[in-house]
Structure formats: structure tokens, C-alpha cells
Amino acid sequence: MCDSVCRRQGTWRWRVFLRRCQRRKAGKVHSYWALVESYRTKKGSRQRVVTYLGELKASERSGWAELGRHLDRRQRPQPSLFDPPAVEEPADDEPVLVNLKGVRLERLRDFGDAWLALGLWRLVELDVLLEQLLPKGREDVPWPLVVAILVIARFCEPSSELHIEHTWYRRSALEELSGVPAAKVHTDRLYQGLDLLLRQKAALEKHLKDRLGDLFDLKYDLLLYDVTSTYFEGQCQGNPKAKRGYSRDSRPDCPQVCIGLVVTEEGIPLGYEVFAGNTHDSKTIPDIVAAMEAKYGQAQRIWVLDRGMVSEKNLEFLRERGAQYIVGTPKAMLRKFESALAEGAWHTVQEGVEVKLVAGPQGAETFVLARSADRREKERAMHQRFLERLEADLHKLRVAAESGRLRDLGVANRRLGRLLQRYQRAAAAFEVKITVLPTVEAQAGRRKKKAPCLAINWTRDESWHAWAELSEGCYLLRTNLVGVDACTLWKRYIQLTDAEWAFRIHKDELAIRPIWHHKDERVQAHILVCFLAYVLWKALAQWMQRSGLGDAPRTLIDELAKIKSGDVVLPTQSADGRAGRAVRLRCVTTPDAAQKVLLNRLGVTLPTRLRRLEEPAQM
């Protein structure tokens, strides 16, 4: 998705991510991290090292300290996982002898990723909010903890609620971190937690807007909006929104729902809505604008929309509400600006991309012409390929007519129509004429051969080639903003890739496709859990940016997932050799040198011990 948008706009949405490096020197292996940038060239995507990361220096700010700068006169958040409490050890009246032969390690659990996710959950204060929103009764497990388990599982290892019950929760250290026994985490409780969570969607979105705005100093004057779809396998008769429509997953045979997502210019999610699967993108604009205004007020905001959502009715709707917009336009509108394309006064916005402002026909709008060198080469190659293929197939059609195998005019026109549809990018480049010839019979040796009945000829349309040469690599934007230069308008529009990148993360990293849900409310609750997991993902990405670790959390999550917790069991004995009580220490594995660099950059301290347990003396 994101790649297609970037290619369409003539740029490349680069990402900075972490790469682990190892170097052997003097017989010793040194591990460290490098920040790597992915960028696009004419020969394809390439990667280069931006900087090498070492130990955190005293002069550098940690990510935690950087976040603290945005919380002026506010209490610092209190996620205990970021500030692990001191372990209170019971005082021993006398020394204890340990039977070394009986020392063992038990209950090895995945600790690092669950520890990080729970810390992010508390950082955005979702635990505090849900304590206020969800009902309290005589339940064994508080509902805020049930929701936390659902979201953290989606963040760490996306799968079904049944997988959470039977596999993930029993393997994760979240049982020790949350205090909820594994026997009390089952599908009935998880499904009921989904039902209760869905009712709080509006309150959750409003809280996250305020909290993330405080943490990361966000601005909400520029809103990026896009739509994607996710499909089901089955009939989904219990979900009235499951309809067949345009599938972004290339599955038009399956019912689906559409999801409209609003994000800020930093890619932070602001809100979303779920639509029926056969809803056209342009039909979602009134609903999503009304929903955002109902939650956050009818302030003057700038909406950035893709060209698939543009219609005169939608633009008039935005103007009536006092909203501003920057939208893409259909390729056909370039014809109205043919003279402007041939003129000069272009401004370079980045290497290979030029823009210029053109006044609208009535003066109420401004148009931005943009042209990209990379996109020009791509479209030129596409046009040439379609021209060659279409001309080769037209030649085959002519040979069939000359040989007498194609004699029916209706069949010839249908075959020509299919060719023009298949190669529609070059269909207007040729003027094809099919004429009917007089039917005569000719003697060909001993056999009679029917003479051709049809003549197929074509000529090239030079005006099409001239327009293609002028318009290749060009596209058009449209806005009602006043007093903004073309470079700024283009940069704001190109940030629409953040919305499409959010969809890629939802699908690839968080597995948003509701494979195990078919009822409408359960599907919407599942999407809400994915939305909250994406909030944690973006909060971590913002935190990493302020720590100098790039903005791709996957490497960091995978590294911390290698950190385990377990119980070190120390059997004791008395001075005369009799077996005593067993001391059980619940400890966390020590990070390696490279993992310590990541933790130092984030500015957090990993706990070394969770608790000390004592077992009764052995008889």
C-alpha cells in the first residue's frame, strides 16, 4: 500500500530502522547497533548506515528524559515497569546452606516484550482510564486487566483468543506482571472483555488524543485520512456490514468491511470508523468528518485526502463546514492545465520532484502541478510496453483477417474491444479501422481458398503521443488553502503515506483480519483492540525517535522478546544435612551488551528480580 502511494507520488517513503552488528577484534566478539536508512534510487531500493550506536554518553538525552520535557508541570507517569521497585528481601536470622546439586531453573517465560507492552499500556494511562469506565462487580479478574491482556497479546503475538488461553499467556511472563493466574484467562472472559470494551470506543479515542498530545507534543491541525478493507472467509451472515466490494487484498470473492482511519502528520491514530464492505471511498467522507467533529469540535482543520475520495459533492461539503483540504485529482484534469505544463516557473521541492502553483478557474481554489523524474521514467516505460504489446496483437488480428480465419465483423469488433480494454493505457494511441471487403472466391491450386472479408488497418495518433510526452510523470493536487507555497502543499499531501503505512502495520504486524470473528459487534471489538495495539506501537515509535533509535519498533520488540524470566530454585539444608525449605527466586535474564544499548537509549532499567518465594520445608 505505502509503496504504491510513494511510487504514485514520485517519491520514496524512507524508514530508519535498527540493525544489529557484530565485530570480532582481538579474539573477542563486540555487538553494537547501527541506524540504517532505506531509500529508493533509479536502480531500486538501497540501504545505508546513518550512524553507529554505542553506549549512552553522559551528554546524550535518553528517550525517557526527552518525553519528560513535554510534561511540564504534570506528574511523571508511574509505570512500575519503567521504575522497578526495590525487592524487599526478608531478613535472615542465620545463614542458609544451599544444596548446589539440587539448584534448578523452572517456569521459563517470555518476559521482555510483555514487560515493554505493559509499560507502554501504563505510559498512555489506559489502565487509569479503564478503571473509571468499565463496571466493577464481583468478577474474579478486573475488566481493565482483561482488556490489557487482549491488547498486549495483540501487540506481542497476534492470534486468536483461543491461542491466548492455551498458548501465549501460559508462555508469557504477563501472569507474574499482571497478577492474573493462567487458569483465569479463558475465551469466555476474553470475549466478554471485547463486548465491554467496544462500548467505550469514543471515550478511548478522546483520551488517547489528549494523552498522546501531551506526551509527544502533537498538533491536530493536519488530518490524514484513508480507507482500507479487510476480508472474511465464509458467508458472515451474522454481520450486515460484510459485503463484497473493491478489495485492497485482491480477494473480491470474499465479503469484507472497510475501515477509514484518521491519523496526524506524525502517523499517530486519531480515530477510525467501520463501513460496509461495498461502500465507495468517497461515500465515507461525510461520516468520518462528522464523527471527528462530534468528538473534537468543529475546528478549522486541514484534511488530506487521496484522489479516490474526491468528488465535487464532498469538496462542497467540506467548504460548507469551514474545513480546508488538500486532495489529489483524477489524471483527466491535467488536460485543463496543458499550457501550464509546458511553461516554466517550476520549483524544486526535492531531488527529482518539481512543483508549481496554478490558479483555479474561479479563483476559489489553487491547483498544484507536480512532476517527478522517476515517475516520468516509469510511466514512459509503461506506455512503451503497452504500445508494443497492443501493436503486436493488432498485427495478429490483421493476419487472422487476411488468412480468412476472421470473417465476421462483429467478432472482429469484440476482439478489438478486448484488446483496447487490456491495453487501455495505450488504447487512444491508435486509430483502428475495420472495413468489409467484397466476398470473392479465388483458386489456390487444387483447393478453393476464401478471400479475406475484412481489412484491418491502424494509424498512430500523434496528438496522443505529444500529450503523453508532456504529461508523463505529472499529477495534480487541489486545495482551498490560501497563502501557502507549492512546496509546503506538496509536502503536506505526501504525508498521506503515513495513513497507508498505518494500514500496513495493522495488517502485517497486528493481523487485523478478523479470521475468527463473524458477528458485527465482535468484528468491531477486534478492530478496536488492533487500534489500541497500534497506539502502543506508535507510542514506542515516537519514543524511539526521541532516543535516536529510528522509528521502526519491530527490531526492538524482537530483541526484548529474547529476555526471559524464570524461577531459580535453591534447595536448602541444615548444618546436620537435613533438607530444609526451598527458596524460589523469580529472576530476569541479564541483557547482553547490544540489548543494554537499546535499554540505555530508551532510558529504562530492566528489573533483575521480580519476587522471592519460599516453599515449605521438605519432609
Image (cartoon, grey):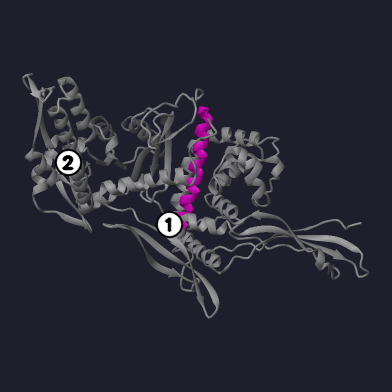
In the structure shown, which secondary structural element does the residue marked by tag 1 occupy?
loop
Image x and y of residue 222, in percent: 33, 46
Left/right placement of residue 1 relative to residue 422 reads right
CA distance separating discs 2 and 1: 42 Å
The amino acid marked with disc number 1 is Asp
Quick one: which residue is furthest to the right in this view? 576
Seen from the viewer's position, the closer of residues 356 and 88 is: 356
Seen from the viewer's position, the closer of residues 596 and 72 is: 596
- The residue carrying pointer 1 sits among few (fewer than 14), some (14 to 19) or many (20 or more) residues within 10 Å by Cα, namely many
Give the labeled residue for mark 1.
551
Please report the bounds of the magenta region as a residue range. 518-543
- Foreground mark, 2 or 1? 2
Q: Quadrant of the N terminus?
A: top left
Disc on the earlier residue, 2 or 1:
2
- The residue carrying pointer 2 sits among few (fewer than 14), some (14 to 19) or many (20 or more) residues within 10 Å by Cα, namely some
Q: Is residue 615 above or below residue 187?
A: below
In the structure shown, which secondary structural element does the residue marked by tag 2 occupy?
helix
Quick one: which residue is furthest to the front in this view? 446
Q: Is residue 605 above or below residue 219?
A: below
Residue 107 drawn in magenta = no
Residue at left offset 37%, top offset 31%: 287
The amino acid marked with disc number 2 is Leu
Left/right placement of residue 74 relative to residue 417 reads right
Seen from the viewer's position, the closer of residues 430 and 529 is: 430
Left/right placement of residue 484 relative to residue 344 reads right
Residue 100 visible to the viewer: yes
Image x and y of residue 479, in percent: 22, 42
Give the labeled residue for mark 2.
387
Image x and y of residue 364, in percent: 17, 38
Residue 528 drawn in magenta = yes
